[in-house]
Every structure is written in structure tokens, then in C-alpha cells.
Amino acid sequence: MNWLYEFPFEIPMDLKAIDASVRAFSVEYDGFFSVIRGGLVNLVSFFNNVLDMIPWAVFILLVFLAGWRVSRKISKGLLFAVLLLFIGAVGFWSLMNETLAIILASVLISLLIGFPIGIFISTGDRANNIMRPILDTMQTMPVFVYLIPAMLFFGLGKAPAVIATTIYAIVPMIRLTNLGIRQIDGEIVEASKAFGSTKLQSLIKVQIPQALPTIMTGVNQTLMMAISMVVTTSMIGATGLGMEVLIAVNRVEIGRGLVSGTSVVIIAVVLDRLTQGLVKRSEVKTDG
Amino acid sequence: MDNNKVKIIEKREQEKKDIDNRETLLEVRNLSKLYGNEKKEAIKLKESGLTKDEVYAETKTTIALWDVCLEVKNKEIFVIIGLSGSGKSTLVRCFNMLNKPTSGSIFYDGKDISKYNNKELMDYRRNKISMVFQSFGLMSHRNVLGNVEYGLEVKGVNKQERYKKAMEMISMVGLDGVEMEPISNLSGGMKQRVGIARALANDPEVLLMDEPFSALDPLVRKDMQFELLNIQRQLDKTIIFITHDINEAFKLGDRVAIMKDGEVIQVDTPERMTSNPKTEYVKRFIDSADKTQVISVKNVMITPNSIVRLRDNPKIAIKTMRESEVSSAYVISQKTKFEGVITLDDALRAQKEGLELSDILIRDILTTSPDALLTDIIADATESKFPLAVVDEENNLKGIVSKVHVLSSMQ
């Protein structure tokens, strides 16, 4: 009866060979990966430089105004400003900029790639059926598993961090763009066709504007996913607030961990509320 | 009835007479549309005599349209009626190729539109045919003007011209002043007016209307039906109108096609369909209709028993009324012109006092046209003290129609 409880056979897997081939692949195409790495590093430092250039007071003022505008409440704007003031006060301002730069770069790439893919898979069921398991895999695969190849191909630092973050954060953008376009009332799409719109006209003039609230939710979700990767990617050398948290955990410095962790939460809350406001505004525009 | 309404009804009656002589604008020939994976097998089974449901049970393939043949004449209102699932919405979407037929052809102006390439189809949709939808199909991210302009915009019409044309259409459907409103601010009836304005802005030859008034409440619906006839009178378009309401079909349609299980059973004018239903199904369908919407006054009016001339003296009038055993008489002059009504009591009084008939004539008698539909005169007929006088445009007395006639024809 032993075979009932012990698996009777085992397929021999040469895991070493997989390691070796991945490594060989990274060496073989090193030139290609260096170019991408260079591009990503430049993109991140561009964002970082821009953020560093903005005086802290101006930045807080902008967030205050933006919060006020999207929520239509002055108290919300004030709350966001005070929260950011806290990050500055605990001395994490430039770390925050570093983290924000990685987040922004990842989100930008996610939108640029995810939006067209989402639209593409909304047009056909076959593309959608092929894409769905891939998206599921991207979302459920433990993040650490693709941190390793990202590190192998792109070395340590911000470039692999952006890649890993993008793989994780792009999924809601694709999904919600697809969903948004599929959800549009069939008669509206029929109407656009019936009036002789080309596919592109129908997409730009009708489908995308109609799907905008859902697409904006996708942007918001992508942003949130990117923020949730901050600490994880610090393990492959992405500096910033995440690194602070990681160091605090490694050294069991509870105070440091609490303050840096709170800072990450503050960034998440402020960015979430601001983009949620955008979602609401796009809803107002389409529904009423 | 107000004058305008009478005119419209008269014109429509005129049109109905020559409907058979119109030239054909759209011709559907052996059109079939199937949904499913086993189309060939389904066609074979259907040809062997199975019903739509049996074919579906066998092959999981739906026969939405089967061997539909019909002609739509130029400038007519062609109504397609059937219960849900009868294929009427599928059929109407074939006219602009939103649905591609499985087999068969549709000819527009002699050309098979199912063989159009992309560009030809686009031109056809942009210039020849447009559509009004059941749940309006309006784009909520655009305001009223933006929606009405849509068809012109995709066609590449410049901004000023677009604006001018759109405003003209908005005013035509009676929406002046709301052009900048967002769609969500409008009532159902107004939304569908926007839908109609949008469809007309392209100046199409053919207007497809897929149950356009089904989502509206009955009163608004009646208004919109009248409005549609009004628009048809002004613009003279060919309209293909889908409905599941036989009253609406008979009210609007020059000709009506009845569909069942994807097949067209009968195509005819409402009158001929009523008098000569092709199958039991058609008959049952028609029986559910309110006949007053189909039957016109001339079908139920009678010749009055007692007619007197205005220059006759009261004595003759009394004699005429006594002979036909009635207590009132219709008075005419110059052989046929209708003047009014006199009562027996008044005539007796006139004889006693030596008055003329013109002194006792009751002139404010309600009149109606022979071509008016019964539904439109019910109120007048039931309220009037005397039967309504039926007169033509020259005020010639054609007959009378009483409350009893109207009400008995309603069963």
C-alpha cells in the first residue's frame, strides 16, 4: 500500500541545466540587456532628477492643490500636505523621490505596454483566451521567482527593479482596459459602426472614452501594485524607502522600520486618493 | 382633431394607395443567417422539413433568418413585426451589414451590399443608411450636439457645416435649447429624439429603426409615432421599422411583414393583411390588434336616413323625418354641401311659428374625414350629441358615423 502514500515515480529534472542555460542566455545577449538596462536607468534617474529639482515646499503645495481639486474638499488637500510634511520631517524626502522615480518609471512602462495589449485582447476572444493564463501566471507567480532572472539579466539596482515591478503591475492595466472596452453597451458600438466609423475612429471616438472610468481604475491599480513592490525590489538593490524598511527588518530596528514603513503607506494613500479622484472625474464625464 | 393631423392622415392615405406602384429600393433575396458551428448540417436538416427548434436541438445551431425574401419600396414605411426571437432585429441589422448573412443577398439600388468591400460598405453606411436603436445607443461622453454630429464627424464634414446640420436636425425633432445638455439629463423620449436626429443628420436614404419606441412609456410613445410620421412627411425617407406591437405596426406601416421563427410569413398593407390573413398565425396576430387603428371612417360610415335640403320648408323636413322614423335630419345645400343638423322638435316649432330651416339649423356639428382612423375619432364620436358628419375636403357630405358604429367595430 506504500504507493498510495508515496509518489511511485519521479521525472528527473536537471535544474542545474536550467540555471546554466539562463546564465548562458544572459551572457550571450549581454549587449541587448545592457541597452535596456541603460535605458531604464536613464528613465529612473530622469524622474529622480525632476523630483529632486522641485523644492519640497512647491511639491507639497502641488499635492495640496491636486488633493483639493480632485476631492473638492480643502480638508483632503490639507491632510495630504501634512502627510507629506511628515515624510520630509523624518528625513526621508530624497529617499521618497528615489522610490517615486522607480514607481513612476514602472507605471509609465506598464501603461505604454499594457494599454495597447488590453485593447488588442478586447477585440478578439482568441487573443483574450491566450492572454488570460499568462496574466494569471504573472500575478500569482511568487515575486521572488522573477527577481532572480531579472537580476541575472539586468544586474543589481534600479533597472531590474523596474522590470520586476512592471511585470507585476502591468496586469491590472491590461485586464481593466480589456474589461472596460468589453463592457461598453453593445448598441453604442453598433451605432458607431452603423454610422460608418472606421475601426480606429470607433476605438478613439467611442470605445476608449466610454471605457475611460474602468481604464482609470486600471491605472490606479497598476500604481498600487507598483507601490506594493517597493520593499521587495529593494532586495535586488533598488535604493529608496524600501531599502530602509529592508535594513530595519534585517537589523531588527523597530523604530526605523515603523517610520520608513509609514512613509511607504503615506505615498500609497496619497497616490491612491489622487488617482481615485481621476477615476471619479472620468465617471462624471461619461455618466452625468 | 387639429387640422395638421388631418392633413397628415390624408396624405398617408393617398400614399398607401400607390404603394404597389413604387419602385423597389431594397430587395432581400433568399437571406439566411445562422449562428453556431454546424451550419451545413443545420441547413440540411431545415431543408428536410425540421422546425427551427428541432434543428437547434439536433445541432446547437440557431437559424436566426431563413430564406427571407422581400422588397422595400422607395419612401415607404416598411414595418417588420414579430415576437422576440423571430429574427426581426437580426434582419434589420443585415440591411447595414452589422450582421453578415450566411447566405443570400440584399440589393440596394441594384447592387448587392453583401458583396461590398470595406470602403464601399463604409460609404454606404455613411451616406445611404442610418439606424435608430431600441436603447438609444447614445454616447454618454458626448452631449446632445456631439451625438448628433457623430455621423458627420466620421464622414469628415467640417466643423461649421457639421454644427449647422446638427442644429437643424435637433430643431427638427423639437429639442431646441438642449443641444449642450449631457445625455444623462434627458428623459427617454428626448433621448430617442436625439437618436433620430443623429440618424437623420447624415441625410440617409434609408432609416433603420430597431424597436425605437419600445423603451418609452405609452403616452410618449404615441407622441413619437406621430412625430415620426411628421418627419417622414417632411423628409420623405424610406423607413424600415421594427416592432413587436401590432398596433404600432398598423399605425405606421405602409406595408407590414410578419415574421415567425426567422421566416417572413406575409408582407402586405395593413388593410389587406386584416382582410386576408395568409395563415392562422397572422390571423391570431391581427386579432390581438386594436382594429380602430386600422379601420378608417369610410369603412364604417353609413348614409343618413334623412337628408333635407336647406331651401326645403319645415313641412317637407318633418315628413322626411317621420318617414324614416328619426328625430333629426342632416341638411345639405347645392346638392351635396353639408350645412348642419335639424331636429324634429325644432322643425315642428318652425312650422308653427313660420320660420325657415336656416333659422333652426344647428351648425356646430363635429365633422370628420372619410380617411380618418377610428382611433382618432373615438373621443369626438362618443361625446357628440349627433352622429359625426363625414365630409371630404370640399365639405361634401359623404355619410355619418355614430358612437355605436365606432364602438361596435372595436371588438
Image (cartoon, rainbow, N blue to C red):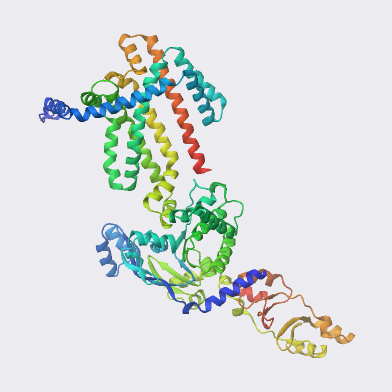
Question: Does residue A131 sit above or below A34 in this rendering?
Answer: below
- Asked whether, in this view, residue A233 is left or right of residue B251, the answer is left
Q: Nearer the viewer, residue B338 or A114?
A: A114
Seen as rendered, the residue at the extreme right is: B353
What x and y, as percent, mark residue B278?
A: 43, 76
Res A1 seen here: no
In terms of image quadrants, where is residue A133? top left
What x and y, as percent, mark residue B174?
A: 60, 58
In terms of image quadrants, where is residue B113? bottom left
Q: State the quadrant of the C terminus of chain B.
A: bottom right
Q: Which residue is pictured at 26% across the width and 29% down the height? A: A141
Question: Does residue B295 sit above or below B184 in this rendering?
Answer: below
- Asked whether, in this view, residue B296 is left or right of residue B22, the answer is right
Question: Does residue B188 sit above or below B290 in this rendering?
Answer: above
Q: State the quadrant of the N terminus of chain B.
A: bottom right
- Asked whether, in this view, residue B180 is left or right of residue A92, the answer is right
Q: Nearer the viewer, residue B100 or A195?
A: A195
Q: How many marks?
A: 0
Question: Does residue A69 sit above or below A207 in this rendering?
Answer: above
Res A113 seen here: yes
What x and y, as percent, mark residue B348?
A: 84, 85
Q: Nearer the viewer, residue A246 or B145?
A: B145
What x and y, as percent, mark residue B140?
A: 50, 47
